Amino acid sequence: MRFTYLATSLVFFFLGPHVTSAFEIEGNHIYPAPNGNLTIKIISTADINVFEPIILAFQRAHPTINVDYVIASSTELMKALYEEGGEFDLAISSAMDLQTKLANDGFAQTYSSNATDTLPDWAKWRNQVFAFTQEPAVVVISKAAFEGIDPPKTREDLISLLRDNPDKFEKRIGTYDVRVSGAGYLFATQDSRNSDSYWRLTEVMGRLNSRLYRGSGDMIHDVASGQLTLAYNVVGSYAMSRLSDYPGIQIILFDDYVNVMLRTALIPKNASNPTQSGMMIDFLATLNRRPELVKLTSLPPIDSAQLQENSAARPIRLGPGLLVFLDRLKKESFLTNWVNSIEQE
């Protein structure tokens, strides 16, 4: 269910007396601390079931800080901060390009600490955008649907498999609708940079009437329920967190390349509690020191050595290069090509 985040004195921002629309949220939960006397307001793309253990662990370390946690899609998060002046203390998103644009255009505060100094250079930008996870984009398949079939190891394998078995995959492939999903757009543009096979794969998925989604969670659920045979470009951490609930799914990391998304946090320019926001950033930046929390959330912490062990890993780099596909003309061109490929008659 989706909610409209209306601008009133009871919520986070005020747009004036003539507001007709506002950004949409997917959920909101308040976490009172044991001795809470101050509240930080977080807007995040991470589902509550994924991020809640982090909030509770943070409050055990900082028992005076309440957390007001709002979930929104990456595009709605961008709308809230960039267009509507939403007042939040921390913004957490899987859309690295949109976070980079917020910082580049003056919507983020600068912050540094001993904890952020330990992050590798590729995991932070201008001391404004800080990565705290490295999450691969994966394929999720139904074990039952793939019985007797070798799962694909590369995108070329997947293209051949789909072409040779149209009856098995017709209307049973899931992928992001990149027009509405910031993470989906990020993965798609990176795919187009890494391999020419991306556009051929998109055309094949289009001919098979693939189903389009806003987020990974629904794709994973529909693979597990048998509605989909496979889902392409799913956020790997979400899939890992669902394995115990959905034993009928299997996660595939391709051998040709694996895009690795960095989930990032920034302090918005109009944050009311930047000091406490910095405490949360420090907590996130040291996630690699909290193995019990990593296990609970299935969020892989920043780890340069782990990336080097997988030669197929392609970490998406923070920095101005991410702004290329946010250029209005480039984005319009990319989306036009994508729509023509995925929505064939």
Image (cartoon, grey):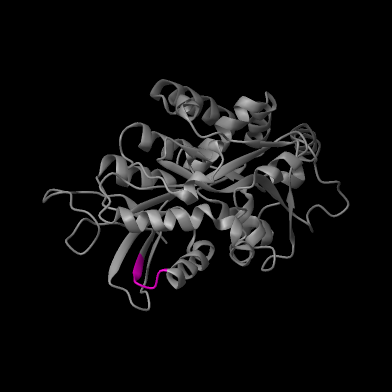
Q: List x then y, in percent, for residue 307.
A: 69, 42
Kindly give the residue lying farthest to the bottom in the view shown.
Answer: 34
Name which quarter of the figure residue 233 lies in.
Answer: top right
Above-or-below relation of 342 to 180: above
Residue at 62% over, 42% down: 210
Q: Is residue 142 visible?
A: yes
Q: Report the number of discs.
A: 0
Examine the structure image and report whether residue 65 is included in the region drawn in magenta. yes
Q: Quadrant of the C terminus?
A: top right
Left or right: 233 in relation to 71: right
Q: Is residue 25 visible?
A: no
Q: List x then y, in percent, for residue 61.
A: 45, 69
Looking at the image, which is closer to me, 140 or 228? 140
Residue at 64% over, 56% down: 239
Left or right: 271 in relation to 316: left
Per the rendered image, the range of residues in magenta is 62-67
Residue at 18% over, 53% down: 14
Looking at the image, which is closer to me, 341 or 238? 238
Examine the structure image and report whether residue 5 is included in the region drawn in magenta. no
Q: List x then y, in percent, for residue 275.
A: 32, 55
